[in-house]
Amino acid sequence: MSEVSKMIKMICDEKGLDYDTVLEAIQTALGAAYRKDFGNRQQNIKTKFDPDSQDMEMWDVKEVVEDIDEETLEKAQEELAERREKALAEGRELSEEEIEDLPRFNPKTQMMISDAKEIDKKASVGDILEIPLEIPGDFGRMAAQTAKQVIIQKLREAERNSVYDDLKEQEEQIIQGVVQRRDRSGAVIIDLGKITGLLPQNEQIRGEKYIPGKRMRFYVISVDIGTRGPEVVLSRSHEDMVKTVFEQEIPEIADGSVIIKKIARDPGHRSKVSVFTEDESIDPIGSCIGQRGSRITTIIDELGGEKVDIILYSEDIVEYIKNSLSPAKIDEVELNEEEKEAIVKVAEDQFSLAIGRGGQNVRLAAELTGWKIKVVQEGEEGKEVSSDGETLDTEKEENKDFAETEKSTEDESGTDEKNAEEEEKADEVKSEKEEKKTDSKANSDEKDKNKDDENKKDKKKKVKEEEE
């Protein structure tokens, strides 16, 4: 194996490319170098390079076409320019259908039949001629530089295409990535290894923290080729992410024994998944939960702690609605077929379970079944909550009374606080007065004491003078 072959193999291992892909890039680069030093821009060069012997052969490849006179070509060019200007004025680009009637000739890739006959008398329209080219000598410095740039460009394109092909196969699948940073638009940039993916703001889970360096799992929405290479759009909130996790973790769903009928998701909080099977020997809910909850626990972990309810699908809409409102126990379901609305009656102790936190349970149940659901509490109060957020007047009144009571309590609390502040200020003033009074008395006592001391000294002095 020659040094050139070893270098090609090393590039293949480093970039993850095929040997033929790298060799093709080298041959394209040699063709560009030949055109730079010995040829011209009108040559369509094909190169054959042997890495072991380092020998190369080159041809100018042309397609044989009908003869077209220069005057016809000039008129066609003028007509093409007019059509292009008209299309630009209309704010669009010319399509191939609009210019296919014009005669066209590309001297780089085509050769007219009269010229082709001079090279090969047997040539006919449609043939591909490979005209051998002579290589006068070694390439110059500029040609070598051109070849280097072409190789770098071709290898970069090949690497991008390789990455694109790999990611395209993972479209609508779940992949792992590392959070990199957040851009100005609020989207999060995710490091996927060889390239980065984009997690748009509308595909993020509200309240979820995307800390740089954190490894997470993402659903691949789409993979496309852009101007800078593959563009990967990711999601954390897509409902198909739940479906994909179920397919990965539950063999019965992967092989089609158990079917996922519908998914209703509140990303980051709760999902409801309705399942069904035609095989009577399989328990669809048990298959999803697993032994001692092993499967559903894994699924919840994959979804970042999001709760998952497994619902048994039924063709009987009444039964299906009852199942969808799990874990609440439903007493009765009344259907309005025209408006596709269901009134669900529950006991007082099941009312809060049926509607869920912030109406989440009834909202997800409505999305799962495709029916508008109203949950009614049986009894004198007759509370009602709808899946679209509507509430009965009695509940509104209760909420109003509750709000007024809270306001009254706040007012009383505010008054008490005000009185307490005034009392506290009065106490402070009284305390200051007492302190001043105490200080004044202390000063007076001190003055009297000093005066008595002076009188005693004067008396002693007088007695001493009398004795003398």
Image (cartoon, helix red, strand yellow):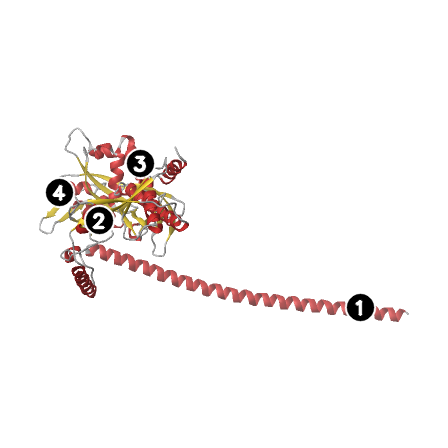
Give whichever of discs 2 and 1 has the lower sequence position: 2
Instruction: Characterize the local packing of mark 3: few (<14), some (14-19) or many (20 or more) Cα atoms within 10 angstroms.
Output: some
- Tell me residue 387's x, y (percent): 20, 50
Q: Quadrant of the N terminus?
A: top left
Q: Earlier in the sequence, mark 2 or mark 3?
A: 3
Q: Nearer the viewer, residue 196 or 166?
A: 166
Q: Position of residue 152 (x, y in %)?
A: 37, 47
Q: Nearer the viewer, mark 2 or mark 3?
A: 3
Q: Amino acid at mark 3?
A: Thr
Return the residue nearer the eye: 92 or 303. 92
User: Would you say residue 394 is visible in this rendering?
Assistant: yes
Q: Mark 4 and mark 1: span between their CA atoms?
A: 114 Å
Q: Which mark is residue 33?
A: none
The type of residue carrying mark 1 is Lys
Q: Residue at x 28, y 56 (%)?
A: 402
Question: Looking at the figure, which quarter contains the C terminus?
Answer: bottom right
Mark 4 crowdedness (10 Å alpha carbons): few <14, some 14-19, many ≥20:
some
Look at the numbered disc 3 and give the secondary structure of its residue.
helix
Residue type of the residue flagged with mark 2? Arg
Categorize mark 1 by other alpha carbons within 10 Å: few (<14), some (14-19), many (20+): few
Question: Do the residues bearing badges 4 and 2 touch, measured as CB atoms within 8 Å?
Answer: no
Q: Secondary structure at mark 4?
A: helix
Whole-number angstrom distance, CA of label 4 to CA of label 2: 16 Å
Q: Quadrant of residue 281?
A: top left
- Residue 93 sits in which quadrant? bottom left
Kindly identify which residue carries mark 3: 298
Percent coordinates x, y for residue 350 in the rendering:
22, 44
Specify the label residue 317 is tagged with.
4
Give me the C-alpha separation between circle 4 and circle 3: 31 Å
- The residue where tag 1 is placed is 457
